[in-house]
Amino acid sequence: EVQLQASGGGLVQAGGSLRLSCAASGFAFDDYNIGWIRQAPGKEREGVSCISSSDGRTYYTDAVKGRFTMSSDNAKNTVYLQLNDLKPEDTAVYHCAADLICALVVGKLADYWGQGTLVTVSS
């Protein structure tokens, strides 16, 4: 059974930081690209970031560039998203997702999705 378990969300003040984790199981972690998609209240899902399993390259949507950083620990089948300098507009449920192609992850068309973790940023 494929599982993508996101954790690490919470309530933080603007300017604060959080680290999200996504623990993956049930598929070949080394073959899949994993990324993050968020959905703010009343808004459509937005592709946030993705990390390539082949070379570790990362992609970020413009709204988070310079503030969010992805990393991967292949030994633990886990990816991380470090969120710094958080803003109220970052408030959303953050889901991790996996696919063979990063473009499909950030395009919200990934093969595998996990339950999200809620990030709330107060002003």
Image (cartoon, rainbow, N blue to C red):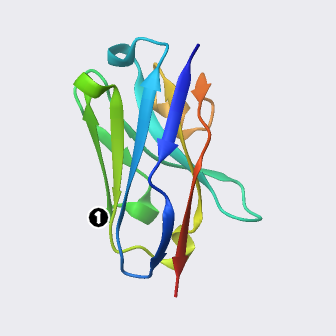
The residue indicated by pointer 1 is 66
Callout count? 1
Residue with the most extreme right position: 42
Q: Residue 115, position in %: x, y?
A: 62, 40
Image-quadrant location for residue 120: bottom right
Give left or right: position of 73 versus 91. Answer: left
Give left or right: position of 97 versus 56. Answer: right
Q: Quadrant of the N terminus?
A: top right
Q: Residue 61, position in %: x, y?
A: 44, 54
Give left or right: position of 56 versus 17. Answer: left
Above or below: residue 66 compared with residue 112: below
Determine if residue 97 is in view.
Answer: no
* Residue at figure coordinates x 42%, y 32% from the top left: 23
Image-quadrant location for residue 110: top right
- Nearest the viewer among 106 and 74 is 74
Q: Residue 59, position in %: x, y?
A: 36, 44
* Residue at figure coordinates x 34%, y 74% from the top left: 85
- Nearest the viewer among 68 and 115 is 115
Residue with the most extreme bottom position: 123
Q: Secondary structure at mark 1?
A: loop
* Residue at figure coordinates x 50%, y 65% from the top left: 10
Determine if residue 23 is in view.
Answer: yes
Above or below: residue 20 compared with residue 112: below
Amino acid tagged 1: Gly
